[in-house]
Image (cartoon, grey):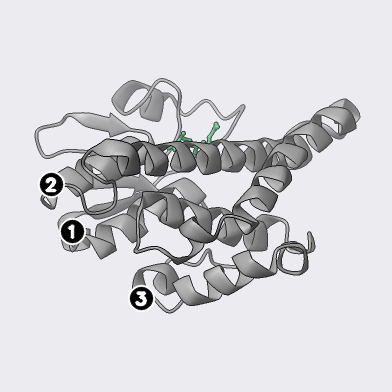
Amino acid sequence: MKLTFSPGSPFARKVRIAAIELGLIDKIELVPATVAPTQKNEAYAHDISPVRKLPALILDSGQVIVDSYNITEYLDELAGGGKLVPASGPARWKVKTEHTLIQSMTDALLLCRYEMGVRPKEFFWQGWYDDQWDRAWVGLGQFENHPDILTRPLDAAQISLVCILGYLDFRFADCGWRKAFPKLDAFHERMLQRESVKVSVPPNG
Ligand SMILES: N[C@@H](CCC(=O)N[C@@H](CS)C(=O)NCC(=O)O)C(=O)O
């Protein structure tokens, strides 16, 4: 299998952590890819995904699986199922919902990043930026007071949470999340004791 990948991507990191935790990383070739708004990358659009986002998992059959959550769930199934995403019942929907919230918060941070780093300065929209930032920040505040996700055995929502925190370090180093959210800081430190989390820290993070 091949995984389109970039070392700074919180979504690709999630898949990498999941693959290591599931014992599948040796079956995956990481293929560096560059995708960004306004950069056409027709080959990626044609061969992998018309919406030009990474990560994507390319199976040996040629089938492509897009979206980091789908890929995580696919890998989980390959490893026997029910390991990072509970197989059924309320626990499954809890992990999936928390995961989706954190993924949407990460999307919001990425939009902030693009607003700052990609959009021409004269078109920067402060109100829109602040609104996206607020979605991520308020969400983090809710997880700060959510003792269950911070302490239970490893799952996909927790992996997502460590990836958004790592992305804050990587792209918004001065935002002060550790001071604002001390329980998330302690969770992040605990997660860093895992090899999977440690080896996947973004390069400048
Ligand atoms: N929901 C997607 C989001 C993926 C995503 O936004 N990836 C970013 C890289 S971190 C990307 O490909 N951006 C390129 C673009 O938006 O043009 C997932 O979880 O895989």
Direction bottom: furthest residue? 193
Circle 3 residue: 195
What is the x, y in percent for residue 89? 26, 37
Q: Nearer the viewer, residue 151 or 170?
A: 151
N-terminal label among 2 and 3: 2
The residue positioned 28% from the left and 52% from the top of the image is 84
Residue situated in front as seen by the camera: 11 or 136 = 136
Q: Nearer the viewer, mark 1 or mark 2?
A: 2
Q: Give the Cα separation between the discs numbered 2 and 3.
A: 21 Å
Position of residue 166 measured from the top left corner of the image (x, y, whole percent): 57, 61
Distance from label 1 to label 3 (Cα)? Answer: 14 Å
User: What's the distance in space between the residues labelled 1 and 2, CA to CA?
Assistant: 9 Å
Does dot 2 land on a helix, a strand or a loop? helix
| Badge number at residue 78 | 2
Secondary structure at badge 1 equals: loop
In the rendered image, which residue does mark 1 sit on? 24
Q: Are marks 1 and 2 in contact (CB under 8 Å)?
A: yes
Question: x, y percentage for residue 83?
Answer: 22, 54
Look at label 2 and name its amino acid.
Answer: Leu
Determine the secondary structure under disc 3. helix
